[in-house]
Image (spheres, rainbow, N blue to C red):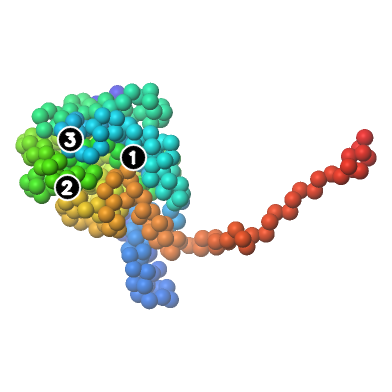
Amino acid sequence: MDTTVDLDTFSSLVERPDESARRAADERWQAADRPRGGLGKLEELGSWLASVQGRSPVLPVSAPKVLLFAADHGVAALGVSRMPARGGTAARVRDVLDGTAPVARLAARYGAEVRVVDVAVDADPADFPDEVVAHRIRRGSGRIDVEDALTAEETVRAFRAGMAVADEEADAGTDLVLLGDLGVGATTVAGVLVGALCGTDAAAVTGRGSGIDDRVWMVKCATIRDSLRRARPVLGDQLALLGTTGGADFAAITGFLLQAAVRRLPVVLDGVVSAACALVAQRIAFRAPEWWRAGQSSGEPAQAKAYDRLTLTPLQDQGITMGEGVGALLALPLLQAAGDALADEAPRPFVPAAAKQPAEPPKLPSAADLLRKL
């Protein structure tokens, strides 16, 4: 297996979305016999869909996929989250797989598939289906305030795993990815990456994450402060940064985002974790953010700083902090509506069940018919 990756190639491989398709979509809006700007944000979203699809009229969003990268983080042992450090991530993965997690139920409601990619959950890989652990790198990660999260070789493997997932989804016909994460302690790691890349101190990027109180917030802030000291010397090397103060999920998500942009696969970002990875990816390919949309504002200060640097405006502000792709998923109806409004063919009209004619029951043979055949 090739354990190297040339980050410089992404700058040339990632192209901008199709500007001519965007202009054609804008012209369709302007030519329509309706008030200018009457559909508000849907018009901008529809034009974005046209640009990433490279066509106008747009195709309705028909194959969305919720993609969740799962991993444990060594800093969780410091008590930076209300979730249990041991077993918490594995339990969340099982909830998604058995369909009881909110993201699984909402995905069923909105017609999206859900895929979990375990890259570093601290659990026996035999606990999950083979397709979930196919890209497993290791169990958990190092405690980034005192040690590296990954080795250099593991970092490259995780990055390439994310690239492979992007290729798998593009080849499978997925037309929109709703990107999320599963991992106790992940918001602490995200705060370190955003703080390092934006040049801020720990307090400016330390949020409440899983709903922590003031005492735990101070522990989290101190952990981010110590980790920032380790992150700053490697700021010039994105892979080294991901390996030193990131984790397998952060490296994989960054690789996924970049390769998805190469494959012209649009992505909706979820919480602070995907925002932090997007910030790293922007350092590698400055055009990549044009293939992404921010699903929601979670209220995490690090997420707000990342989106400001990425010049992305969240589509919604529902205050959802749980991760798991829920915030990104809630933006799906908006994007589906935008696609339907600009599509060439009108969607089939909805027919209430009560108005549908019941199917005629099959005609069963009578006793006399059966006797005649004897």
Residue at 29% from the left image edge and 45% from the top image edge: 323
Q: Nearer the viewer, mark 2 or mark 1?
A: 2
* Residue type highlighted by circle 1: Leu
- The answer to which of 347 and 77 lies nearer the viewer is 77
The residue to which callout 2 is attached is 207
Badge 2 density bin: few <14, some 14–19, many ≥20, Cα 10 Å: many
The vertical placement of 55 against 255, above or below, is below
- Check residue 291 in the rendering and tell me which mark sits there, or answer none: none
Tag 2 secondary structure: loop
* Residue type highlighted by circle 2: Gly
The vertical placement of 307 against 39, above or below, is above
Residue at 29% from the left image edge and 48% from the top image edge: 270
Q: Nearer the viewer, mark 3 or mark 2?
A: 3
Q: CA distance from mark 3 to mark 1?
A: 23 Å
Question: Disc 3, disc 1: CB below 8 Å?
Answer: no
Residue at 23% from the left image edge and 39% from the top image edge: 82
Q: Earlier in the sequence, mark 2 or mark 1?
A: 1
Residue 46, visible in the rendered structure: yes
Residue at 15% from the left image edge and 33% from the top image edge: 78
- Check residue 68 in the rendering and tell me which mark sits there, or answer none: 1
Quarter of the image where one finds residue 356? bottom right
Q: Which image quadrant: the C terminus?
A: top right
Question: Disc 2, disc 1: CB below 8 Å?
Answer: no
The residue to which callout 3 is attached is 79
Tag 1 secondary structure: strand
Count the marks: 3
Q: Viewed as shown, does residue 339 lie left or right of 275?
A: right
